[in-house]
Image (spheres, grey):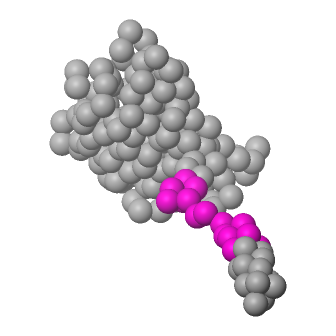
Amino acid sequence: MKGCIRLILVFFIGFVVFFGSSCKKTSSNPSTPSIPPFQAYVNAYWMGTSNDSYTPSVQNNSGIFTITGKYTSGSGSTYYSQGITIITNITGTGTYNLNYSTDGNASYYGGDAHVSAVFNTDSTHIGTLNVTYYNSSTSTISGSFNFNAYSAKGLNGNGNPGTATISGSFYQLKW
């Protein structure tokens, strides 16, 4: 009888050790998906192609920030370039007006070797910059933007006035 109890006890301990050690603890924090440093849409269309990326930059000149995302491809007759520039006084997280005044302004340019157009905010074509992360110790900033802009040349550069709606985000840019 003692041999039988010992055998059951050894079997039970072996069972617990074998199956207990094969359990995996799952993390309650799933990994964060990769976030591009700069992405933008013009009239709801992605700027560039699905494989393109923007070269972002940010400059801080005594609190006046210039945030830029630029994309270029090709050369000569196949050259294409587009970009967004936002200039405003940033003091921390919050929402900032983009209306081509002392508050701040934004612009979008796009074109190829033959046609180009520049769209700017003005008193009637306005938008906002929402700074969601600002760390002066690490010189890092994140946020999103949305603005309407006007061009005398229009979106295809045909000379007809036009507007564009530009939106996007930037993530962990360093100045």
Is residue 17 one of those drawn in magenta?
A: yes
Residue 19 at x, y percent in the picture: 72, 75
Residue 129 at x, y percent in the picture: 31, 38
Q: Is residue 56 above or below residue 138?
A: below
Over which residues does the magenta segment extend? 16-32
Q: Name the residue nearer the viewer: 72 or 112.
A: 72
Q: Tell me which secondary structure the magenta stretch mostly adopts.
A: loop
Q: Name the residue nearer the viewer: 34 or 149.
A: 34
Q: Name the residue nearer the viewer: 92 or 42.
A: 92
- Residue at the (42%, 24%) spot, across then down: 135
- Residue at the (51%, 56%) spot, across then down: 29
Residue 8, by quadrant, is bottom right
Number of labels in the image equals 0
Is residue 19 in sight in this rendering?
no
Q: Residue furthest front?
A: 1
- Residue at the (51%, 35%) spot, across then down: 172
Residue 20 at x, y percent in the picture: 68, 71
Residue 101, by quadrant, is top left
Q: Residue furthest top?
A: 62
Q: Residue furthest left?
A: 124
Q: Is residue 91 above or below residue 31?
A: above
Residue 72 at x, y percent in the picture: 66, 43
